[in-house]
Amino acid sequence: MNPDELHYTQSHEWVRIDGDIGTIGITDHAQKELGEIVYLELPEVGHVYNADEEFGTVESVKAVSELFIPISGEIVEINRSAVAEPGIVNDDPLGDGWLIKLKVTTDDEVRKLMSAEQYAEYVQAEEKEK
Amino acid sequence: MSVEIENDRETATPPTLGDRLHPEPRHELLVFERSGAGKVGYSLPPLDVPDVSAIPAGLLRGEIEGETEITEVEVARHFTRLSRLNFSIDENTYPLGSCTMKHNPRTNEEMARLPGFAASHPLAPEEVSAGTLELAWRLEQVLKELTGLARVTLQPAAGAQGELAGILMVRAALEKEGNPRTTVLIPDSAHGTNPASAHFAGYKVRELKSNARGTLDLDVLEGAMTSDVAALMLTVPNTLGIFEDRILEIARIVHAKGGYLYCDGANFNSFVGIARPGAMGIDVMHMNLHKTFSTPHGGGGPGSGPVAVTTKLAPHLPRPTIERREDGSFGLDFDRPESIGRLRTFLGNYGMFVRALAYISSYGNRIGEVARGAVLNANYIRAGLAAHYHLKYDAPSMHEVVFSDKRQAEKGVHNGDIGKRLMDYGFHPPTISFPLIVHGALMIEPTETESRSGLDAFIAAMRAIAREVEEDPSIVLNAPHTTPVKRVDEVGAARNLILRWKPDGRETADGKRET
């Protein structure tokens, strides 16, 4: 379910690294917890963020949740089709439902994120707490 | 002569006997849809003076295409029918958690309608406003007594504006000391408006994770409380209905770093007259007259969100302040150079002041009974439902209890379904999916004004729904069954907003015609 080549955060975002470009989205677990997504607020291209800063919000019928950027970088692209049709994020959170692409500032931050296996354990522990 | 029947889709088919025994709720047309050419809702006598038009012809508006034309009786019936489709606190229990939907005593309404208050002009000079000013001043004194704080402003129009006022006063005080600081700390069990208010006041928000008991984790607070933090915004008791029993230590940690302790007093209903926030180390706190002090709430409103502050913050209160002068007269003081400014026209939502003071006066020294009743009623519901619905936290409940849908979710039924099914039983749903730290939350606040029989009826309905979930979940999944509008498409409505009705076709939010 959680591909091995991605890196994961405790706030349920994922990152895929291709060269110096990082693609960021929310996990399948996150979209299930949120329920049907009705609105996405994403940043402008060109905006620069430090890791862990809030970069947008995702709104479902139940709640509005903040999105936190896993690694530092400059936004180079946002997924306009997901903004127009937020349901894409529910249907394909790891693929067509990606949210932003950024030019990565540094290589070391991504190493601090969770692997697929670690993330699966983290989600399991969170589920137990419910 | 032929008669054309209008709007025949409403009444065209005569009901069968079965329909009459179990009538389908009627669909109420929009008032615009009742429009008909030539209908009028007024009659004027014939003109018996020369027709002199004072308005230049070029400025006169011609016929408005599609304007609603309707008779008075249709308007009266339309709105009366709508009012009967509505649900209100005057009809049945309204356990909407965190909102404190308590009865609005009729004596408050009588007081607010006294012509001396209701008909007073907001621009009347002080000499003829002695009574209205004195009442507001007296309410301030009572709120000072109840909060144990030095001064009160009644200006904020509702709770969230009170929050903004409070944080702006903190900012002003810190600016005076030389550094407004950058961050406001807010626990994950706080009211949702707190982060917005802090943000509006120019602060970054840092969320603090609650501990396993559902209260603020002191180690987390100690770690986050730096000299960059302007304030901790604490909801007391928090949105889980749990009292922060280490409030004195919390205040010590915040004050040690020069920060201020803000209390979201929306839940004051659970300890008013029992304990004073000022004695807990709280520096600034808003209250909601429309919650704790029984003024009308939602729809009818308006709200009112007074703020109480310490002596240190008092110079920054919104202006004007209401003052009693040495000769005993009352007046407004605009000469307050350190004030954060004006928040609201005139004195605020004045009618609410009259109602709130009437409510407080009717209890007098026994005002603590409000809190005792609210806590008792919430715990009565907790005891009645604990065997049927999951409770995430063991800590004792104050004025509200937060269950979750954990057991029902195993049958595919979620909190929203349970809320909708409650409508079939004649109750307003509880607050759903809040606080966010309880997955599938059902947040129930009965308030002190529910009788035991009312509480028993609510418990019986919730137990019946739990039984339905076990036996036939589809009843709950497809609820409501008895309301005029059945299950609505919430996702469709949110994704495709239609904000304007047009007679000749629907129009979407972005102005594009739907086909």
Image (tube, coloured by chain):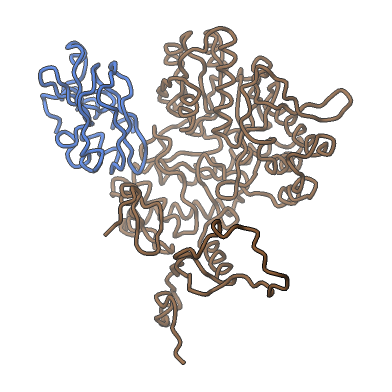
Towards the viewer: B504 or B316: B504
- Asked whether, in this view, residue B161 is left or right of residue A24, the answer is right
- Asked whether, in this view, residue B358 is left or right of residue A113, the answer is right
- Asked whether, in this view, residue B82 is left or right of residue A82, the answer is right
- Asked whether, in this view, residue B172 is left or right of residue B361, the answer is left
Q: In this view, does B450 lie above or below B2?
A: above
Residue B295, given in percent of the width and then of the height, sits at 65, 44
Towards the viewer: B124 or A65: B124
Residue A115, given in percent of the width and then of the height, sits at 16, 21
Residue B459, given in percent of the width and then of the height, sits at 49, 51
Q: Is residue B39 at least partly visible in the picture?
A: yes
Image colour assigned to chain A: blue
The number of discs equals: 0
Towards the viewer: B165 or B251: B165
Please state, as top left, top right, bottom left or bottom right, where the C terminus of chain B lies in the image.
Answer: bottom left
**Image point 37% across, 38% down: which residue?**
A63
Image colour assigned to chain B: brown
Residue B184, given in percent of the width and then of the height, sits at 47, 19
Direction bottom: furthest residue? B1
**Image point 67% across, 65% down: which residue?**
B52
Quarter of the image for residue B224 reads top left
Q: Is residue A117 at least partly visible in the picture?
A: no
Quarter of the image for residue A32 reads top left
